Amino acid sequence: MARRCSICGRGPQTSFSRSHSNVATKRRQYLNLQTKTISGKKIKICARCLKSLKKKMGLS
């Protein structure tokens, strides 16, 4: 399974890691994915969507 949120569809972004000499090396910034069981199904959900769901539905 990909590192993608099943609610909003966000995936990893690319950025640069900078060394002391300012050399740029490409790297990936991954989401804060959590595996949660919601209504009987295990899904991968990002922390931002999880926070929104807790506000909207009152989940714990």
Image (cartoon, rainbow, N blue to C red):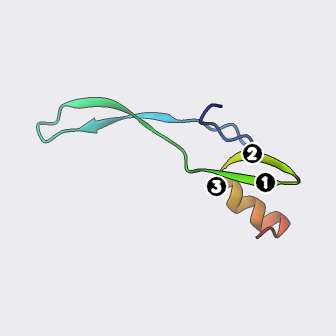
Q: Quadrant of residue 52?
A: bottom right
Q: CA distance from mark 1 to mark 2?
A: 6 Å
29 vs 53: above or below: above
Q: Position of residue 5 (x, y in %)?
A: 67, 41
Who's the residue at 75% across and 43% down the image?
7
Q: Of helix, strand and loop, which one carries label 2?
A: strand
Q: Quadrant of residue 25?
A: top left
Q: Of helix, strand and loop, which one carries label 1?
A: strand
Q: Position of residue 4 (x, y in %)?
A: 63, 37
Verify CB contact (< 8 Å) between mark 1 and mark 3: no
Label 2 vs label 3, nearer the camera = 2
58 vs 5: above or below: below
Who's the residue at 23% across and 38% down the image?
18
Q: 23 or 46: which is nearer to us?
A: 46
45 vs 1: above or below: below
**Is residue 55 left or right of 33 when viewed as pictured?**
right
Question: 10 Å neighbourhood of mark 3: few (<14), some, or many (≥20)?
Answer: few
Residue furthest left in the image: 21
Q: Quadrant of the N terminus?
A: top right
Say which mark, if any, is on residue 22: none
Label 2 vs 3, first from the N-terminus: 2
Number of marks in the rendered image? 3
Verify CB contact (< 8 Å) between mark 1 and mark 2: yes
Tell me the residue that label 1 is attached to: 37
Tell me the residue that label 3 is attached to: 48
